[in-house]
Amino acid sequence: MRKLLSVRSLGLSVKFWSVLAGSGLPLLSAACARGPQSGLADVKNQAIAQVLPELQAPSLDSEEVTSFSLLGDEERVIIVLRDAFEALGRTELKRGLKRTEILERAIAYGKSKKTLLGALGVNDLTVDRDYEHLPILKVRINSQAALDVLRRSDRVVRVMRDAKIKRSDLQSFPLIGQPGAVASGADGRGTSVAILDSGVDYTQATFGSCTGPGLPADKCRVSFARDFDVEDNTPDDAIRHGTNVAGIVADLAPGTKILSLDIFDGDYAYTSTIVDAINWVIANKDTYSIAAMNLSIGGGRYYRTCDSNPMAVALQDARDAGVLAAVASGNEGHTDSMSAPGCAPAAVSVGAVYDGNYGSASWGDCSDATTAADKVVCFANVPSFLKLLAPGVSITAAGVTMSGTSQATPHAAASLAILRSKFQEDSVNDLEARLIATGKMVKDDRSGITKPRIDLTAALAQSTCQITVNPTTVSASAGGGTYSVTLSTGSACAWTAASDSDWLQIASGSESGTGPQTIRVSLLSHPESGTRTGNLTITTDDETKDVSFLQSSDSAAPTGSVVVNSNALYTRTLSVTLKLTASDASGVSEMCVSEAATCTTWEAFKDTRQFTLANTQGAHTVNVWFKDAVGNAMSAPVSDAITFDSVAPLMGRLSSSTTTSSISLTWSNATDSVSGVASYKLVYTRGYFTVPASACSSGIVVPITTAGRAAINGLRRGTTYRFRLCATDKAGNTAAGLVATVTTRSR
């Protein structure tokens, strides 16, 4: 059941459809079109959508919907697979994955999904939609037990309801340098931008007054149109949100084509529908030369990036395929969070600024006492992890005027298309970096956060082969070692690396290359006093960057310890195990092991070593010296002691007395001059010809409860017994033992 949700606007009443409050579906609040109450021209089409409080998604940090319960008899659920999800992120490729690689990934996803469904073993689950190019399934679940099994599966990284998403809502073009870009020939020609929105009224003159998608062929700029939810047989809904958004792209990038992907059913789009549209983009990115997607939608509140949200996963797959997505940050006025899918790491998230002075402006939930070009609008979500800003106030396109981060976002989508048409060999990372690195830095007065506002002129003029290195300075130890420097540059940019010092050596294979790479360098040890400095210089045709290496000297010897046989006090063997630990600023390279007070035979350091003691009974001290990589050696060793004892105790005398049923034995103490006697063992056998084995390794054991004596009762009358008494020392040596033959009395 649904009910009407009242929406405030300037002087008129607009109504939106909403789900019934309390129905349990998490409504993701919109980054919706905004309209000011004063100071702006042509406000008749501007509306401020106010979501009822009980319908707002919980303000939780990122992944908040994995612990819900089934509502009703059936629930539509989105699943993100773990193993497939972890395979995402190959965005260093020039133009994204090749067609064959996309198909290979789709096959791998299919296998993962089949394995998951087979492993679940539940009957109350039906696959509703398999997005073949994404690690995502949409399923219908008919029992709480099935939902619980799914959520507990280690093959699944995310389970969430099929949530509803709402729409987010020309002087702006000169602000970002569009006229000059188009005049130079950079107009997006040869590309398409997919508009995931409410549809596009392609009959408008802005799009070539099309009679249908792609018709007439010589004038129509909307080359494809499809309803991904409910087929309503209309190019756009009454709100005309998608038409305005597409019009901004069409006007800003006059050479690009528009793909109208209608994801809305009324005022909302389900997560599954959005994912379906992104899946289509991946499958058709080569057919239509898709450079970018525009998603002027959003919901929820995320305080950090949301990488396992189904829409975020889909956007990452699209990015891997070579298609970037410009996504609205949302219009709730947050400075610490934004909506989804703008929070996706793969998204190019966009906030809004004014493009001029409008006087004071009121936006319902917030107001700006003054306005000016490049002032952040009070309704815009601008957290620290936002990527870009663009004009978003009173943007007129295709006969519609609207305001919001929805209107800022197509400025980014169109800019990406323009950059793609100009820099065809750039990777998606390169394109995104151009917009971010060349944007005009704008400070948000609300928080002090500074973000780049799109500057197309600068982005187009940016050197193709600029360099970024990380780190720029390396503090190295005196002992030297191997270090890595990350080089970021255009994927087609050739570069060379050179060192100005013989102790700073570039590893083989790192002297030159093309595109981003990790450069490895090796530093020799520094035995001299003072700190020395060397530079690694990286050069492209357009720029040179230095990485400074500062290597300090080392005059201190290592510190460490040695432990013999795990701290045992005694050993019966000459071979012992040494456990060695040592540390030094330059690294420990050598050690010397000896029982003598001095040592001259150095060997490579290792943390475990076998050592043979001198063949003498008694205490032994093992000394170890350590030397570091620059030659500093310990003047005094570290030591550990152990006693070598391989001789069994010397037995005393064994005496006996008897009755008809018992035998009593007494003995004098054994002696051991090295480790001392630790214990005694007494065993016996019955019969004259059976003798207990040497060292008391066989026979019936007699408990010894009193030192020097033992009694055995319950024996047979007139029967002979053979006894053996053995002493064991503290090193574990056992004597062969004393033997006594005793016969019980017959009467």
Image: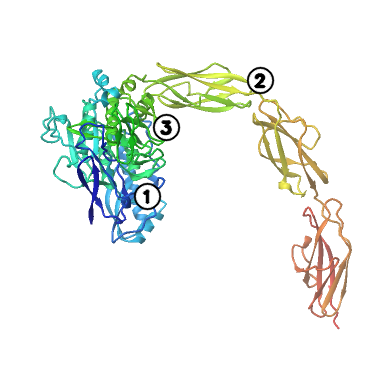
Task: Depth check: give the residue in front, 693 or 517.
Answer: 517
Separation (CA) of disc 1 from disc 3:
25 Å
383 lies left or right of 740: left
Q: Do the residues labelled 1 and 3 touch (CB within 8 Å)?
A: no
Residue at which label 1 appears: 58
Image-quadrant location for residue 285:
top left
Separation (CA) of disc 3 from disc 2:
42 Å
Closer to the chain start, of discs 1 and 3, is: 1
Task: Depth check: give the residue in front, 463 or 120.
Answer: 463
Mark 2: few, some, or many residues within 10 Å (few <14, many ≥20)? few
Task: Depth check: give the residue in front, 123 or 240.
Answer: 240
Q: Nearer the viewer, mark 1 or mark 2?
A: 1
Residue at which label 3 appears: 449
Q: Assign a secondary structure to mark 3.
A: loop
Mark 3: few, some, or many residues within 10 Å (few <14, many ≥20)? some
Image-quadrant location for residue 403:
top left
Mark 1: few, some, or many residues within 10 Å (few <14, many ≥20)? some
